[in-house]
Image (spheres, rainbow, N blue to C red):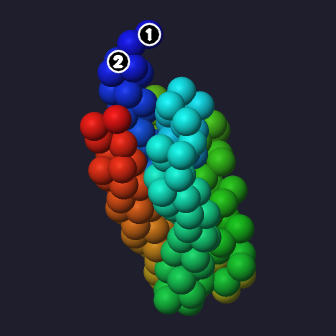
């Protein structure tokens, strides 16, 4: 495979990684790291040292942002651990289509609504206050969505660093 074709296929893989950083349940920053590593195997790691360091840092930051954003969203909304646990359970139930209303909507819809419903139900078990439960559920979902946007920006930055440091290869 010509190097130019490989380069653009890896850039395409990295674009999928940027999308995955924003969309829950899809691989994100890890795809970007894989793309940089493949380029390093083909052209030597000296040519990608900066890009590799940046992408690994972005991967680590993305994991931290993911956890921190959901936690801060929950804390800001006054959610308990029950609400957070409910959101996690709701995410998995929604992702695998186990919520009856989302069998037709697919995993993306389930991943968006599942955590909200799970957080509301979990928080309601804890405090028996429906209004507070809804507020906690919305806080968890908003925090998670903001975290995903931050992860997308980090992933975009990593791809830009790769392009700048390898162009023209």
In the figure, residue 14 lies in which quadrant?
A: top left
x and y percent of residue 145 in the render?
42, 64
Q: Which mark is residue 104?
A: none
Element marked by disc 2: helix
The residue at the point 71 percent across, 79 percent down is: 81
Where's the N terminus, which quadrant? top left
Q: Say if mark 1 contacts mark 2, CB within 8 Å.
A: yes
In the figure, residue 74 lies in which quadrant?
A: bottom right
According to the picture, the residue beneath numbered tag 2 turns out to be 5
The residue at the point 28 percent across, 37 percent down is: 168
Q: Nearer the viewer, residue 142 or 65?
A: 65
Element marked by disc 1: loop
Residue 46 visible in the picture? yes
Where's the C terminus, which quadrant? top left
Q: For the view shown, which residue lies furthest in the top direction?
A: 1
Establish if 133 lies above or below 19. below
x and y percent of residue 112 in the render?
46, 53
Locate residue 40 relative to residue 169 in the image: left or right: right
Locate residue 126 relative to residue 10 in the image: left or right: right
According to the picture, the residue beneath numbered tag 1 turns out to be 1
x and y percent of residue 161 in the render?
36, 55
């Amino acid at each position: 495979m010509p190097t130019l074709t490989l380069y653009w296929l890896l850039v395409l893989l990295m674009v999928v990684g940027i999308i995955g950083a924003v969309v829950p349940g899809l691989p994100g920053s890890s795809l970007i790291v894989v793309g940089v590593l493949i380029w390093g195997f083909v052209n030597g790691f000296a040519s990608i040292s900066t890009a590799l360091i940046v992408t690994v840092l972005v991967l680590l930051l993305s994991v931290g942002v993911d956890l921190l954003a959901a936690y801060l969203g929950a804390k800001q909304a006054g959610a308990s651990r029950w609400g957070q646990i409910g959101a996690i359970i709701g995410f998995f139930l929604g992702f695998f289509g186990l919520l009856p209303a989302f069998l037709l909507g697919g995993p993306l819809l389930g991943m968006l609504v599942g955590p909200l419903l799970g957080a509301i139900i979990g928080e309601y078990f804890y405090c028996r206050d429906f209004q507070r439960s809804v507020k906690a559920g919305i806080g968890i979902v908003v925090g998670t969505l903001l975290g995903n946007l931050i992860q997308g920006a980090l992933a975009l930055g990593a791809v830009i660093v790769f392009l700048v440091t390898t162009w023209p290869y």
